[in-house]
Amino acid sequence: MTEEARTKRLNNPFVGGRFLASMILSGLLASCCCPEQVPKCENVRAAPTQPPSQDSPPLGSQVIVLPFQNPLPVVPRHQEGAYTCWATCAEMIMEFIGGVRVRQCVQTDRPFYGSRCCDSSLYLNFFDNCDSPSFPEFGRWGYSFQYSPSPLTWNQITNEINGSRPFAFAWTRLNSVTGASLPISHMMTVIGYDEGNGQQTLVCLNPRAFANTIICWIPYEDYRATAATAVPAANSEYVHGSDYYMIMPSP
Amino acid sequence: MKLRHVIPVLLLAPQVLWAAVPYTNDLGSARSAGTNSLTTLRALVTPANYYLLGFQSNDEALQATNAEPLLIYVVVHTNLLSYHPGQSFEPLLESTPRHLIIPVMVATNVRSSITLRAIPSAPGAPLAWTNASWGQKELIRDLMGTYRSIPNAEVKSGTSPFFVEMPVFSVWLVGYYNSQDKLILRATVDMRLEPVTVHRNEIITEAAMYQLAIIAQRYNGLPN
């Protein structure tokens, strides 16, 4: 980390304390369930009685401690730009793991741009350089991570979720008839796994522009499809791109 | 493209059309695949996740039924890049839809969804379908909300609305033919497309589509 980046990080009120309490603060959560973009909710890490959602009902003032959940109670966040799915994924993951939101506009900002990517409410400004496709920069915000260009094994995935570590992956969409790359890459956050009815699935938070993040279950086979197994050979219209996993606060 | 001749609700099986477009026999295979997929969806439901899948209780999933499948047309990225005001929206859409979304209902309420994708089948055989995703309660509610907001009188007789996906933004629209046989697209969420803003359920204007094209031109191939 450069000195400039370190200084910027230390001065950033949204990236100060990592790992806020792992204690469960459902009473606080109950009063807001973190309605989107409300600053006073930003530092609350919580495990509700049911997984949170953007439209979850109030939860009451219970205190419930769970060792881990599947799916993990990661708060879905709204993708603020047309192209900030990667920052949305990173925001959701870092909020869950570290207890602090790193807003999308903060992630897309660059020192030489000044602070132009954030408006007064910490929403993303729609300048071209602020609203662009990219990759998460967990290291920039004080997190260690591992990068894999290959899909994770089922065992690795269950280890991540059982270890309370959501992770991000990108895949590239193909033309469903020809198999040619469109080429459009998209990033999602994996928060759980399931094997109901013998179907191995990943539970994902799927950001989309201008709208609430979607919670979906996708077949593991689709997630791990490679160029050799995807259409037209038959079984997927996506090709795996990369994974950011083992995300933890840096020591 | 003969999109105008397509009746997207598979039940209506028109006499037209493109190879590989799912009709008649394909309807049966889509319904059958949807039934199997609903069985899987029910098996995925647990006390820890029913809410995420869109149900109001763990038991509610047992009452869930599939509505009729609805076609999804995908906006072809390269076609979007070259869009200019004055052009029809028809050429933007893929000629052969390969995806269906099936609303999952509890009584008359949309709770969840199943998405199926066509996969290759033997020549002459009905299309085969495979699971693409489950859940997506937020999406199916947006889609059906806009679908239901369209006045019946505005939709060309004998046709029904369908869904349109713009993969580059993961933006979803609802499309239909109006009584003048013009393809109309409506937004399912509010979209700020500086300097144009389109609100949920509003018709996508040529100016708005042009803004989407301009934004799409900035796509650099990295994850979005």
Image (tube, coloured by chain):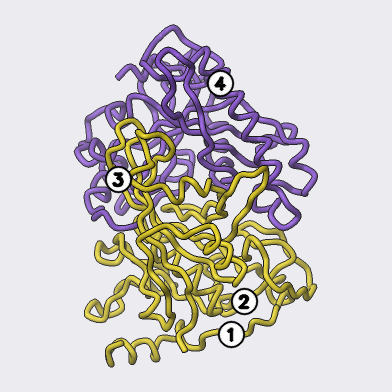
How would you rate the neighbour count of disc 3 (Cα within 10 Å): few for under 14, some for 14-19, many for 20 or more?
many
Q: Residue at x 53, y 79 (%)?
A: A98
Q: Please tell me the numbered disc located at residue A45.
A: 2
Are the residues tagged 2 and 1 within 8 Å (C-beta)? Answer: yes
- Image colour for chain A is yellow
In this view, the mark in front (3 or 1): 1
Q: Name the chain letter of the residue that bears numbered label 4.
A: B
In this view, the mark in front (2 or 3): 2
In this view, the mark in front (4 or 1): 4
Q: Which residue is mark 1?
A: A20
Chain with colour purple in the figure:
B
Asked whether the residues under marks 2 and 1 belong to the same chain, the reply is yes
Task: Examine the rendered structure and indicate whether residue A66 appears above or below residue A224.
Answer: below
Q: Which residue is mark 3?
A: B212
In this view, the mark in front (2 or 4): 4
Q: Earlier in the sequence, mark 3 or mark 4?
A: 4
| Residue A42 location, quadrant | bottom right
Identified by mark 1, the residue type is Leu
Camera-side residue of B177 and B63: B63
| Residue B202 location, quadrant | top left
How would you rate the neighbour count of disc 4 (Cα within 10 Å): few for under 14, some for 14-19, many for 20 or more?
some
